Amino acid sequence: MKLIYVLFDSLVRNALGAYGGRWIPTPNFDRFAARAVTFDNHWVGSLPCMPARREMHTGRYNFLHRGWGPLEPFDRSVFERLGREGVYTHLVSDHFHYFEDGGATYHQRYASWDFIRGQENDKWKAMVEPPIERFKKMYDPRNYTLPEDRKRMMHCITREFVKDEADFPCVKCFRGGLEFLDQNRTANDWLLQIECFDPHEPFYAPERFRTAAGVDESHPVLDWPRYDAVVEDVYACEQMRANFAGLVRMCDHYFGELLDYMDRHAMWEDTALVLTTDHGFLLSEHDWWGKCRMPFYNEVAHIPLMVYTPGAAAQAGRRCTSLTQTIDLAPTLLDYFGRGPDAEITGASLLPLLAHDEALRDVALYGIFGGSLNVTDGRYTYFHYPRDLSGDGLYEYTLMPTHMNRMFPVEQLRGLALGRAFDFTQGVRPLRIPALREGERPELNGGFLDTRSMLFDLRDDYAQNRPIDAPEVVARLKAAATAVLARHDVPAEVYERYVLEPLAD
């Protein structure tokens, strides 16, 4: 058995022709959709990047117990399990968050890995005295506050070393994937993960893709919107969207090179291919840029998934309408290699859905630690916010006290206690650490925006422009969400935070 797992970051569904997108040509993504089964009702779980990847490894939600962080000692990674049981796993990735404090345990779960440097603010190249004045002329201050914004300064330095198309990390990722295939495509029992940080911001693509997307090269760079309300003029918005479009064009092109390779070597006969992303991104829709701080509109939460297996080749071009989520990927990978799920997994294998739709769940929950509890049944979506976002009683349960790029501060650790064991911690009692301002509590670091609880009918208003008042629907969705919380053995304070009544024992 052989499988290629292609994971992009922030690949928005509305950019793909296979999902009705028309503003960016995506001939290769669409070409794959014609061969694969396309999932029309696929949703995120935990956001953003590393919480989503913990779900991909473990097959269960992250955001109900913890924020951004590493895999835990008690987590069972499907990639590590496959490796123990005779399936060789290889990761090629430019996702630099794996090498920050909050992601440092993921890549070692693979039999081998190749890390490509140079994305976003990866601390890659040293420049003690950067040309700040030149940078200020090159980069629009609406996106780049230089030199105060050290994150964006690091990216400006990196771009001094990424000039030719072959230098771009996404290009190197696919080259690394093809190198693995050159060496190993005739072997048996392997999984190759090609993971590209693109089209995540900053939206920096090779020149030919920027030109095709209509980027104005005579103007200072506008390619890195801040996670906030849209305040820019029409020109700036168009340029940021054009730079994003150039990046999607690049992703589509190099994904097409993988498809060409599989064509040349008749790999469709014995190799599965999965294409997906971790989350989407608001590109001025609803007058927002970004994700996480603002409501989890469909542009962020409703994401693409396409799956091809040799055994389901006859299902080419089929659409699946079953309600699926990121947590379903782990059991799907296990199932493809003939392994059953671990007891802690709450997702379900998608392989049976390649031939016919069936109900996997009544509702899907999704969100970010500490934020709104979002729920959909595929027809309705409901954003349910706590009454007091910044109130006490929010705790992280972890044995790996690191945030995105730093350890938990001592001020936060002073309040820790030993928590209870959960049904996924293998009898281990994790630390119970207050989510404090001194840590990285989301609403106290930048703040959540527009925290209204809202219900939308996706059949009549997929764009989510008109919240509706339907108390009976809200009550039904909240009751279904409560059942999902119980299945995930959430701590008691979660029910209190969201004013939900726990199920009776």
Image (cartoon, rainbow, N blue to C red):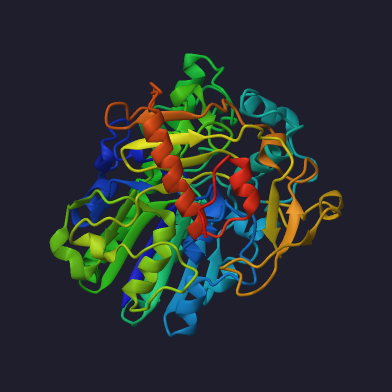
Residue 208 appears in the figure: no
| Image spot of residue 458 (x, y percent) | 32, 32
**395 horizontally vs 214: left or right:** right
Q: Is residue 368 above or below residue 331?
A: above
In the displayed orientation, state which residue is furthest to the front. Answer: 504
Q: For the point 27% across and 40% down, which residue is it?
A: 19
**201 horizontally vs 2: left or right:** right
Q: For the point 47% across and 37% down, which residue is it?
A: 281
| Image spot of residue 237 (x, y percent) | 48, 22
Q: Quadrant of residue 51?
A: bottom right
Q: How many marks?
A: 0
Q: Is residue 142 above or below residue 500?
A: above
Which residue occupies the foreground of this view, 198 or 423? 423
Q: Is residue 496 above or below residue 53?
A: above
Q: Quadrant of the N terminus?
A: bottom left
Q: For the point 50% across and 65% down, which residue is it?
A: 57
Q: Is residue 336 above or below residue 93?
A: below
Which residue occupies the foreground of this view, 128 or 472? 472
| Image spot of residue 114 (x, y percent) | 54, 67
| Image spot of residue 381 (x, y percent) | 40, 36
Residue 186 appears in the figure: yes
Which residue occupies the foreground of this view, 20 or 334? 334
In the displayed orientation, state which residue is furthest to the top. Answer: 233
**294 horizontally vs 165: left or right:** right
Q: Quadrant of residue 134?
A: top right
